[in-house]
Each structure stands twice: as C-alpha cells, then as structure tokens.
Amino acid sequence: MAVRATLSRFPIDPDAHEGSGLPWGVTVTPFAVKDENGQPPAYGSDGHLLPRCENCWAYFNTYCELEQWSWTCSLCGTLNGLSSEVIARYSRPQSCPEMMSSFIDLELPAGGPEEEATQARPVYVAAVDLSSSEEFLELTKSALLAALEALGPGSLFGLATFSHKLGLYDVQGPIPVVKNVLIPPDSEGTLPIELEDVMPLLQFLAPVETCKDRIASALETLRPTTSWERTTAAGQGMDGVLMGGRGFGVAMEALFNYLGSEYGSTFALARIFAFLSGPPDYGAGTLDTRRYGEQYASKGEDADRALLPEQTPFYKDLAAVAVQAGVCVDIFAVTNEYTDLASLKFLSIESGGSLFLYSNSDDSTLPQDMYRMLSRPYAFGCILRLRTSSEFKPGNSYGHFFPDPQYENVQHIICCDSYATYAYDFEFANNVGFSRHGSEMPTLQIAFQYTVVVPPEELSNSELSSATRSKHSLKRRLRIRTLQYGTAQNINEVYDSVDPEVVLSLLVHKVILASLEQGVREGRMLLHDWLVILTAQYNDAYKLVQYKNGNSVKGQMDFTFSQCPQLQPLPRLVFALLRNPLLRFHEEGVHPDYRIYLQCLFSALEPSSLHRAVYPVLVSYSTPDKQAYPRHSLNRAALITSGSPIFFLDAFTTLIVFYSSTADPALPFPPPHDCLLRTSINKLKQDRCITPKLIFIRGGQEDATVFENYLIEEQDVDGSGHTSVMGFVSFLEDITHSVLEYMK
C-alpha cells in the first residue's frame, strides 16, 4: 500500500491551509505490493483478533500507547481495555505484526463452510460485438488468445456475442455450438427468456485448462453480421431503412443477471470483457450519436460541456446491477466513430474495471494490454476505509469505486490491481486545527479488506488434500497502514514539504470533476486561477511584495518560485495540463471519446505515472549505451543546446526514440537490443499498467511531427490552435499579469 501526501508537513490550522493555496490530501494505491519507500508489509494471521477502538473503530497500531491491561487509540485518544486473548497474544510481541510495523497484512478466517471456499473459481466472459468488421474480429480473436495464455488453471471462460441477437457458446463438446436469442428492438425491452433456460451457466462456462483448444476453435467461427441480417431482424424489408444492430445494453444486462445467479457459489468474482466496435444502436440502452457533430455550431451550444455528461442513466443504473452481481466490466472500444463513452464509462469505472480506447485495429496494442492486465495479481470484493485523527477529516474522495450507501468514507471496489490509485482531500474538523505544542501528531489510518484467489500450488501441504488439489481457494485479508505526519509551524515549512506529483494528482481529479459538471472551459479557468492565487500567496508569504502608493511593485516579485524548489515544477505542470487533450477545446480537434478515455485513465494513475502522462520525461543519450542528461525541458532549445544525438521521450502511453538530424551516421539505428537505452525501455514497459507504443524516428529522414508535438513548451495554451515560439514564456507572462491584477 503506497500512500503519498501533497504535504509531508500538514498545515497547522484552517488559516494556514487557506493561506498556502495548496490542495491538502493523499493518494492511496492500496494493493501495491510495497509502500512508497519500497518496504513490504509485515505479514501475519488472525486479523480478526486485532483490537479496535470502542470510540472511532480504528485498529490498534504501533503508534498506540500500550499498557498491561489497556491501550490508548492513536487517532482519537480513547482508552480501551484488552481481552485476555489479546493480552496473551501481546505477551509475545515478536510474533505480532501489529507490534512490529505500522504497515501490516493479516489473514482473516474463512467466513463460510470450507467446501464453499474451495469451490470458488475465477470466471471470465468475453462479450464480442458482431456488428463489426473482419479486422475488428481478427484483433479481438488475437486479444482473447492472449488472454487464454494469461489465465491460470482453474479459471472458467465463457464466450458470448451480441448484435441484434445474443449468442452463447457451448465449447465443452467436440464442436462449438452457439445458441442465439433475439434482442427486442424496442428501447424498453429485455430478453424474452432467461439465459439459464437457453444454456445452463456451467455448460456455458468452460474450464480453461481442458477447453483451451475448443475455445480457440469457437473464436475462429466468429463472423460479422451482415447488414441484410440486421435489417431483416429489425423488421424492415430489403428496401427498408437500414437499422442499427448493436444491442449492447440488453446483452450486458442479461449477462449480469445470468452470472449473478451463481455469485458466491460458483464464483467470487466474474470479469466481463466487452469488445465494442461502435455505439450501442439497437434495443434498450441505444445511444443517440447525433449529438456529436455540426449541430452545436448552429445551436450555439458549448460542445465541450454538452458531450461530457451521460445522455441516459441507463448504463449508470446497469453498473449498479453489475456491482450487485459481483461482476467487473472491462470495455475495449476499437473505433474511430463517436461511441459516447461518456455514457458507457460507468459500467467499467463503478465496477472496478478498465476502459480502453483504440482508434483503429492496425497498430492496436489490445492483445498486449489484455495479456498484461490478466497476468498481474488483483484483489476483489475490496472495502477501503480511511480514518483520521479527530482534528481533521476526509473531504472528497476520487477514484474508480462506488461509495458505501450507509457509511461515510467507505468505498467498495469490485476489482483492484496493484496500480489502481485513489485520492482523498482533507479539511479541518473545526477552526482550532492541530495543537502547536502537543505531542499528538496528525494520524491517518487506511484499512483495506480484500479477497485473493490462491492457486493450489500456493497453499501449504497441510491445506492440500486430494479433493482440493486442483481447486483454487479464497483468502480474505486485511491490510492496514497507519501514518503520522508532522505539522508546519509556518507557511515556509508548508511550501518546503510539497510533493508536486501528488499536487498534480489532486488537481487532475478536481479539474475532471469541474469539467464534467460545468464544461472544459470552467476546468481550464479553475486551473489557471489556482496557479494565480498560489503565486500571489507565495509572494506574500515570502514577503516579496513591495507596495508603493498602495500598489504592488512588479520588479520585486518572484513568478518562478525561485526560493522554493518544491514549488518550481508547478507552473510547467499546470501549463502542460492546459495543453493536454484532457482540457483542450473541442474545436482544437479533441475527440470527445478520447477525452473521456483520458479522464478514466488519469483518474486511476499513481502520481509518478500521471506526471509522465501530463509532462513527458525527455532524456538524452550521447550513444545508445551512455546517458547524457536525465531530464530536459520540452522545447527545441533544450534539444539544440544539449548537443546530444539521441533523445528518449516517455509520455506514458507513447515512448519515442529520436535521432537528431545531426547525429553521427555511424550510430546504430534503431538502438541495438542489448544497449542501455533498450534495457531502460524494456524495464519501463514491464512496469507499466498499459502497453505503451514504441516509435523510432530518424530526424531529417523521417517525419518527426509525432515527436515535435510533445515539445509542448513551444505551443500556445490559449486554445487558438496556432503554435507560438512563446508558448510557455507567454503563459508565464499571462500568469504574471493575472497575479498583479489579483494583488491590486
């Protein structure tokens, strides 16, 4: 569990927080194997015996005062008694993880009968769009073959298709058999028959280890539905109007209900991979894609505002059905037509799944992403709870979860991998703040309860019997992290304790929220105004503002935070965020689906990854085996003045190796596989949650536009679309002007 705070020293009171101009909060990556310093948790058992505070329900931790018969809670100060069982346990402190570390991971006893626990198997269902092209289906087949290689033994796999009908495949016999149910064309309709009556669920779900070849054979039979089939199904004659044929909404609802009937007995988690080649345009859940187009120009509507909210609550309501059925949904959209991901996204983000968008099937990384996603460990049935000491409390929470309807600051996450990150911001509980001289430090406790599927080979021999040897078992665990923070006695200490990457994370969450509610223009203004106020308050705090006849004197002011290294990256990060497609205007050519995809991606990234995605890292090499400079600004001047022949740019989703036009022709191109540069690239690719595209460009001989587009400091930020050599410089001048106006 990695936890990073925007400020390592918390503001002392509400005035100090307000006066700093900085967001105050944390990012949490609960299923990360190690903490932010690379330390693993202390492992142990008997998590149910861990003492809890009678007042605030916090767990006992190393910061609590322990006496012979009692302990004092480090969060609320309550004195709690100890049971005789716990007293006996704590007489041997070396065997208790909670006595040794403030970061622990404890096994919880199995809740149900032993037989039920061993029956649980991971279930995966592919739902493939047949209202598509041959190219789309070829790519989908490749992705599913990669998925089958990544799935562990004991997994169950089901293949379903959808168009104007829903198809279920039985792959357990000698030849694959598909049974189809027609989807009603009306927008209120559901399937006329239960899927269990079409094909029993255990006939549909095939064991991967014995049926892999048969599943592959079934995939080979997938063919696109013809326009004739779709037109006829929609009740039109051959000369009728061509109707849509992608009944995605009804298909998803039917599959959730189908799987939900066995939730908890056959499986503890099911994942549906939904492969879409365009918008749902048939039956219930149909999306009107006419809202994207020229009509905004004539209506005078703000396209940046109109295309961000969902057009129907259908998919948000359907996400609640998925959550109840214990189903996590991953959406893979392979399309360049408007698909209205703003409406569809709730299926994935509320169920703990991912949303992927590929503009075409030619150079898509879908098979690699699929393999990567299924190869890494994940937890499911997770509950995340954040508690704080009494002086402050969580404000907003951000991330791909659904909040508990009953308890505050409790989030449910159906599926959580080691990259998934959530964020919280804090506010003071009263006007007093933290004690200036007291010994109590601000304390934070994050509890993460989760389940993992443990393959038979990971169980100890004593847990194995011949009956359970081939079965997966479930393990419920409780991971707890307790942290204490210092307080800043003055504003300079606050500024010196800033983590700019975490500040960026919280800013991204806030501007996404603002743009969803009020439009992209509002999100941009919020970000611009935030930097103006921060710059003004910094100058005020450092007493840099000189007043003459009541007006501040510009010459004395510091607009680059030269006296505080921790704040210096922020103007560049804000500038880069304003240049990012996330916040660029519709008229600049940003596709609304791509914007939604970025919102979903950025709101789940841990801070260092998000930093790369917003402001790419540019490294130079003097040879493929020798690094020259570890970091350059993103402008041409940096390239020219460095004099290096090779540049490597990491923009998170894209990696570019660029040889300058003046590079020695004797340098090997592309860089050899065993060189330092290639080794660095391979490590980056391994550690990434998605598969980045790798591009090699030889300057002067090949089109370098894709590389030059990342040199954002030379591009203007005003949305005019015209590049300007004064991009970042003119942005700073604009901030300077705005700060002077603000301070008048």
Image (spheres, rainbow, N blue to C red):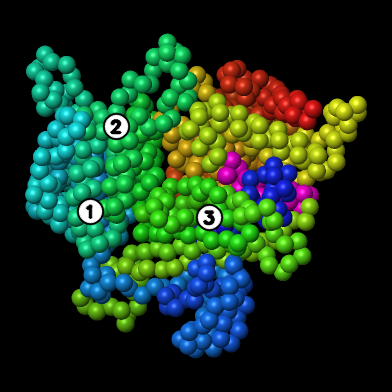
Specify the principal SS of the magenta part: helix
In the current view of this chain or complex, which residue is farthest to the front? 431
Mark 2 is surrounded, within 10 Å at the Cα level, by few (under 14), some (14 to 19) or many (20 or more) other residues, namely many
* Figure quadrant of residue 160: top left
Q: Inspect this view and state whether residue 452 appears.
A: yes
Looking at the image, residue 685 sits to the left or right of residue 241; the answer is: right
| Quadrant occupied by the C terminus | top right
Q: Report the residue at 26% width, 30% height from top.
A: 286
From the viewer's perspective, is the residue at label 2 or at label 1 nearer?
1
In this rendering, the answer to whether 34 lies above or below 491 is: below
The reply to whether residue 416 is visible in this rendering is no
In the figure, is residue 308 to the left or right of 468? right
Query: What residue did someone put label 2 on?
Result: 277
**Nearer the N terminus, badge 2 or badge 1?**
1
For disc 3, the marked residue is 28
The location of residue 283, given as percent across then percent down, is 20, 31
Q: Bounds of the magenta span?
A: 491-507
